[in-house]
Image (cartoon, rainbow, N blue to C red):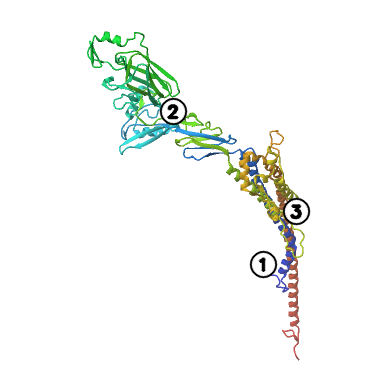
Amino acid sequence: MPVSISGLSSDIDTQGIVNKLVEVERRPIERLQYEKQEKEYQKKTWNQLKEKLKKFDTTLQKLYGHNRIFRKRKFISDSEEYFTALAKDNADKGEHKIQVDQLAAAHKITTDQIPADKQLSGSTFSIQIGKDTVKIDNFKNGGTIEKLIEVLQNDADTIVKIQKVKSDENNIILSIESKKTGRLNDIKLSPETASDNKLFDELGLFRTEEPIALHFDFNNKTPQQLKFDDNGFNNTPALLIQKKSPSALSINKKISEGSLDFMYKSVSPPAVDISGNLIKKRSIDEVTIKDVTILGADLILNKIKEVETVDKGEAQLQIELENNDMITIDLPASGNWAQIKKELDRDSGIKNLTFINNSEDHYLVDDIRIFEKETDKTAYKNVVTEPQDAKLKMDGVELTRDRNNNLEDVIDGANLNLHKKTPEEVKVAISEDKEEIEKSLMDFIKEYNDVIDFIKKNGKNPQAKKPGEKNLEKGILSNDFSLMNLHSKMRGTVLNSYTTSLGNKLSILAQIGISTGKWGSAWENIQKGLLILDNEKFDLAINSMGDQISEIFGYDANNDKKLDTGVAFTLDNIIQPFINSRGIISGKMDLADALIRSTDKNIERKEKMLETYRRNLEHKFGKMEQGLQQLKASQKTLDNQINTLPGNSPSGKKKEE
């Protein structure tokens, strides 16, 4: 492209003249660009307002919508170390007393120490926890204890926790723990065939005999409240049950299944005289009474105390269970030691054993044993924790649950989580969540004020300037009727009165501590229309009215099961037309976009026209430069011709003669 330097021919800055002429013609484009920037800023401002209104709408929904904050309940307890709870919405408010007597526990067993390099027998077996069962068939070829652990972790991970414990550098212990707590979620191991039991034997999982849960042989310690005789079973002390009297043993032992086993015999009571003194028998034929030896004892004793010949009566053992059921075992008279064995297949613990003697004989009882039977044919050898249910009292009512967490049916409307046993009853309460309600009200006030202040700032329309008065800055959305209408309606809504079930006691926001200023506040502050919260007044309101204060925000005044009045309800209806996808603000933004596009096209068209105008000017000035250059060239040619005429010097002067 050729380079042109203006003004060489005319000594005039023609390019500068062109630029200034173009600059004058550019002013309409600059005005269009300013209008475009203003529309873009207006669009941005409308979008900011929409976001603020949407945020405010979310807060309004918390105050009157389906999930409004006044439905929320809070579980209150000073003993969170023992249990915690999450209250559900609309839970009944009230106080309760809870006592945790026992936590639910998971069944956990271990193997014996197994050498790490030992080759275990192959086995196919099942693991059952409650109603869930998994089959282990990937150890049918056997292997080391580590291989077994890997198989169990892969195949049974859904129902049990498998851990490897190194007891020392050469031996490993396998730990199996149920993933569910509760008495019925015990671990059941079932081999597929009898030969598959060999693996269990190698692991030392089971013991061969039933475990004895309790054993009373009275050798070392005898309960003080009971009577004993030296003529016991195997020459040990025996429990003496005298005629016509009961003897009770307190057991309080929980067993799922098992048996009761004891030895007993009946003996004739010792002879006494009419005064109740013991008659010591010296020989078969003589009896000593008060240092007097009497011969022919049998005849004389019949006279001292007549021997009854009626039915001697019966003796019984009554077994009282934890569920208050009673099992009765008859004890026929027996002059020799006899054994009684009773299977206990009921799912309840033994509470008391009471021997009732209605006979004329005395009874001796010894070697009382309670066997606890596992559901399998053998008992686990190494039990870390037994499976057990949680036991607690709720307002005095005894409850059992198979887990500690997420107990939904203990406190109506709350999920209870147990952490540890309580030393005594603990008071708890369910009430409205005052802190969350106050936080939501503060959000309501803050976001309302933010919207009002934003509208006032961006919709500002300054009055005519008076002498000496500072000119006020005009808002970007000034003179917008819809914006001013929104501002007016919102301010009026928070000051209006509303219908509630409490009548005049609750009809305006000021009655719960929300107002534009306390009584006596400066008018200029009240005039701003911004809300504040009086915390003291709010506390008084919620303590006296509870969650009924929600009615000032949304209420069904005509009982048609639909909310139709209230501050939040009304405000939401006011702002919805502005924030809808095809609402007022979206329309304003779409209009701004259309004007911006139109302005862009207008600017583009004018830029093209201006470029044409510039080229025309440059062409015209270029022509002028060309003409001047030609004139200069002609002038020079003419001057050269004149200088060559006779009598003219090269300088153009005539020669002197």
Q: Nearer the viewer, mark 2 or mark 3?
A: 2
Q: Residues within 10 Å of mark 2 (few under 14, many from 20)?
A: many
Label 1 is placed on what type of residue? Val
Q: Nearer the viewer, residue 394 or 267?
A: 267
x and y, in percent, of residue 644 in the image: 74, 82
Q: Which residue is mark 1?
A: 3
x and y, in percent, of residue 205 in the image: 35, 29
Assign the N terminus to one quadrant of the image. bottom right
Q: Is residue 529 above or below residue 627?
A: above
Q: Which residue is mark 3?
A: 479
Q: Secondary structure at mark 3?
A: loop
Q: Residue at x 53, y 33 (%)?
A: 411
Q: Residues within 10 Å of mark 1 (few under 14, many from 20)?
A: few
Label 3 is placed on what type of residue? Asn
Sequence-wise first label, 1 or 3? 1
Do labels 2 and 3 touch, CB within 8 Å? no
Q: CA distance from mark 2 to mark 3?
A: 76 Å
Q: Is residue 280 above or below residue 146?
A: above
Do labels 1 and 2 touch, CB within 8 Å? no
